[in-house]
Image (tube, rainbow, N blue to C red):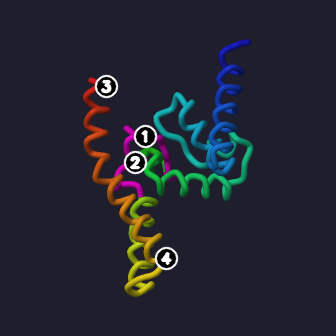
Amino acid sequence: MTPAPRLHEAAERLALVLSGQGLQRMTARVLTALLFSEKSSVTMSELADELQASAGSISGALKNLTSVGLVERVPAPASRRDHFRLRPDAWATLYTSQNQTIAAFLEAADDGIAATGGSGLARDRLVEMRDFYAFLLGEIPAVLERWQAGRR
């Protein structure tokens, strides 16, 4: 098998694994397209062509990937289209406070705690949720520091 079909097959296999773990199918395919791309950035149109998908589904997938910190919009001076790339250090960013999803979980938990009043099972569950994510965010800097040290 030549390299191009092997790469395509490997990308599709990874997309299946990611979607099997709960990622929406198109989001998984866009992520793998960015991972396997040899370009520094791509447009939505290029992704739609490569994945034979609608602009709307590509846009939704990019929004999901951007919100968790894996993908970012980048400037392309010679182009009038938005360009996207896998964020440098994307996997570490996925678990930091730069992840809009974790920040949203914390904010929603705090709002829920305030709405429940002073006690009850719902409040206890929401406090546990908030405390877990706050703990996780507090521990991540040390984990990332060890990760970076190991990469040097």
Q: Where does the image place residue 115, in percent across and percent down from the top left?
A: 43, 85
- Distance of mark 3 from mark 4, alpha carbons? 44 Å
Q: Residue at x 44, y 77 (%)?
A: 123
- Distance of mark 4 from mark 2, alpha carbons? 28 Å
Q: Residue at x 37, y 38 (%)?
A: 89
Asked if residue 37 can be seen in this view, the reply is yes
Report the number of numbered marks.
Answer: 4
Q: Which residue is mark 3?
A: 151
> Which secondary structure class fits the magenta region best?
loop
**At numbered mark 4, what does the secondary structure look like: helix, strand or loop?**
helix
Amino acid type indicated by mark 2: Tyr
**At numbered mark 3, what does the secondary structure look like: helix, strand or loop?**
helix
Q: What numbered label is drawn on residue 121? A: 4
- Residue 98 lies in the magenta stretch: yes
Q: What numbered label is drawn on residue 95? A: 2
Amino acid type indicated by mark 4: Leu
| Mark 2 residue crowding within 10 angstroms, few (<14) / some (14–19) / many (20+) | some
Seen in the image, is 110 located left or right of residue 19? left
Task: Say if mark 1 contacts mark 2, CB within 8 Å.
Answer: yes
Q: State the extent of the magenta-drawn residues as a range.
A: 80-99
Q: In the image, which is nearer the foreground, mark 1 or mark 4? A: 4
Closer to us: 81 or 84: 84
Q: Earlier in the sequence, mark 4 or mark 2?
A: 2
Q: Which residue is mark 1?
A: 91
| Mark 4 residue crowding within 10 angstroms, few (<14) / some (14–19) / many (20+) | few
**At numbered mark 1, what does the secondary structure look like: helix, strand or loop?**
helix
Seen in the image, is 102 located left or right of residue 145? right
Amino acid type indicated by mark 3: Arg
Seen in the image, is 7 located left or right of residue 117? right
Q: Residue at x 71, y 21 (%)?
A: 5
Location of the C terminus (image quadrant)? top left
